[in-house]
Image (cartoon, helix red, strand yellow):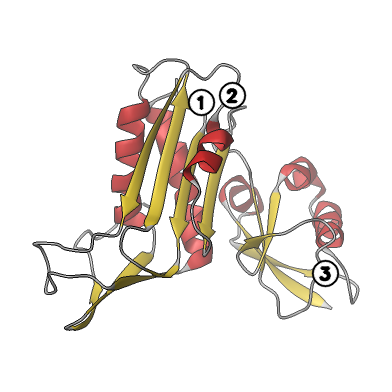
Amino acid sequence: MQVKVLLFATLRQAAGATSVRIDIADRAAVADVRAALMKEYPGMAGLFQRALAAVNQEFAPEDRQITNSDEVAFFPPVSGGTEFPTFCRLTRRPIKIDSVVRKVTLPSTGAVAVFTGVIRRKTSRGDFPETAALTYEAYQPMALGKMIQIAREMREQWPAVEGIAIVQRLGTMLPETVTVIIACSSAHRDEGVFEAARYGIDRLKEIVPVWKKEISPDGQTWVEGDYIPQAGE
């Protein structure tokens, strides 16, 4: 059978395409797709060997079986060619802050700055002063690629930052629920972790295709921003 494989970041750049089609046997697994990609693109074998795999927007183990209707994606676990961890994820499960902090904590880490977005129950802005729930949706493959891009931008501006995590929750959630987290670690607190975390959430609001619907006792409305990304941004 033939499957379409989405590529992101360094893989997309090396292949010169956002997606490729690969022939694999029926009942093949993620490991077989990876092997087929390495064989088809031997110059990129090292990139594919290190890449993370996702099936239908969920991280997938090597033995995850593939069907021709699955959406398969490969992307680098680390952005910007650094040894430090980058963790970017879209999830429908509750965000566990301690778990995310552990993702960016290294033996050399002495500071972690964390921004969390939480659903307000009451607000003075917008059409509805009281929020019963929010629904978050995303153009998921593009959103993940843009989150990886933001992590790369953060590293370029604050090179002393070690680990970076960007996690966005999707689905319908009640007030007081954490919807997004940006976590940045470094050896010391004065090495850009606060600034990088602030930049990360601001940039996420600008270029990551995630939008929300506000649900209140008085009605529902989709919330739209006013920032228009430029070509190539």
Kindly identify the residue that appears in the image at 19 percent across and 63 percent down.
Answer: 226
What residue would you read off at disc 1? 162
48 in relation to 92, above or below: above
Corner quadrant of residue 122: bottom left
Q: Which mark is residue 128?
A: none
Q: CA distance from mark 2 to mark 3?
A: 33 Å
**Residue linked to disc 2:** 106
> Given the image, on which type of amino acid does mark 1 rest?
Glu
Label 1 Cα neighbours within 10 Å, binned few <14 / some 14-19 / many ≥20: many
Whole-percent x and y of residue 183?
A: 43, 37
* Left or right: where 152 falls relative to 75: left
Identify the residue shown where x is 70% and y is 75%. Answer: 70
Determine the CA span between mark 3 and mark 1. Answer: 34 Å
Residue 36 is left or right of residue 144, and the answer is: right
Give residue 136's position: percent from left, percent from top.
Answer: 38, 69
Q: Are marks 2 and 1 in contact (CB under 8 Å)?
A: yes
The amino acid beneath tag 3 is Gln
Asked whether residue 47 is in view, the answer is yes
The structure residue drawn at horizontal position 20% and vertical position 81%, both measured from the top left corner, is: 217
Mark 2–mark 1 Cα distance, whole angstroms, equals 8 Å
Foreground residue among 140 and 45: 140
Q: Quadrant of the N terminus?
A: bottom right
Q: Which residue is mark 3?
A: 65
Disc number lying in front (2 or 3) = 2
Q: Is residue 121 left or right of residue 83?
A: left
Mark nearer the N terminus (3 vs 1): 3
Note whether 140 is above or below 219 in the view shown.
Answer: above
Secondary structure, mark 1, is loop
Q: Position of residue 196 (x, y in %)?
A: 35, 33
Earlier residue among tags 2 and 3: 3
